[in-house]
Image (cartoon, grey):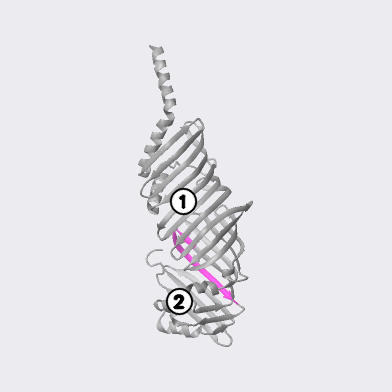
Amino acid sequence: MLKKSLIIIVLLLLLVFLLKDLLLKVYITNYIEKTFKGDCAIERISISVKRIEVDNLEFSNEGIDFVLEEGGANFSFPHGLKPEVSRIDLSNVYLKIKNLKRMRDALGKTVALNAPEVRPGQTPPLDVDLENITVELRNVKNLSLALNFSFRGSIHNSKISTIENIDISDCNIKFRFLEANNLNLKKIRADLYALKIPCLRIKGEEIRNISIPLEIELGRIVFVEAQNVFLGPDAYFGGSIEFRNPEFICLNLDLQKLSFENPIGIISDDVALRGLFEGRITVCLEGGKVSKIEADFHNDGGGFMNIEKEVSLDFLKAYLDKSSYKALIDGFKDYAYNSGVIKLSKKERDLLLNLKFSSMRMGKRNIIINFHDIWGGGE
């Protein structure tokens, strides 16, 4: 009797071993469908003592379409039966985001339900190798995005801890009146990367051959001194993007020998502002919304301003009373100045523009324009 029981147990264990990949495939498929509320199909899953591999996984719901050609994870059991993942590698992935809010809600709930309580420093770093990842976002909150990227590094305590390489290619971005085509990011040496944008369109105006050297650090991207003739023949800029806290992102730019001729030309061909400025721009996002805008530029070398046609600034009538609008139009016609200051700041839902110029021959000009509720009910 005992012998028969042992034979049955051995046969059952052998059957489970032979069917382990199929059983795991059924379990993971059902888990993904229930957790993310969508349709999932997996061609093959293979599991061994230290690694699991997945081929041709497809998933779709109201928020996303996801296709994974090859994926794998290395794991071990250093603390009993609880597995510890040490490496994840994915290649040839396609992700289409159809509804950003639904995707974030699903991921947020999943993380909240499945994330264990971990003390800082308790878990080892997770090696990550992502190759040929394609992401597509079509007209979600006026944003369309398509890009291909690869990443190799590690994650520790839910944050990127090391970066070995980042590669971005075939990136196209369209947001309202801004469009960038064929953007790419390549590593040059060590921590130095080159960001290249062959063509950037702003309201139909083209800026070509933008090249920016970057240093990519943890939670920070540094713009090494860069130049572009659109900002002036001798203009150069540097700065950084701070994102140590993903909910609070800030862009800081320092600009030298900046000419406003081309930027103003995007708004109107009938307004001229000549002269070289120096200054700084800060734009911050908090929780995906603009929380701070500050710009401060000054000119101590003099220049020239002219408004050729009043109709070119008709849109300002909504933000200025008649006397201020007339003072702006009349005051800046053929105006030669010795010094000037341009300031921009955000106060609640308004954007304040302060133009302060001084001329020894033509007097001072000081105009404040308050762009009320410029985001129109949604930032």
Label placed on residue 135: 1
Does residue 268 appear to the left or right of 98 in the view shown? right
Distance between mark 1 and mark 2 Cα atoms: 40 Å
Q: Quadrant of residue 121?
A: top right
Label placed on residue 369: 2
* Residue 171 part of the magenta-drawn span: no
Q: Quadrant of residue 3?
A: top left
Q: Earlier in the sequence, mark 1 or mark 2?
A: 1
Residue 21 coordinates in the image, percent (x, y):
43, 31
Element marked by disc 1: strand
Asked whether residue 287 is in view, the answer is: no
Residue 120 coordinates in the image, percent (x, y):
52, 44
Q: Quadrant of residue 197?
A: bottom right
Q: Which residues are magenta?
A: 284-299
Asked whether residue 284 is in view, the answer is: yes
Element marked by disc 2: strand
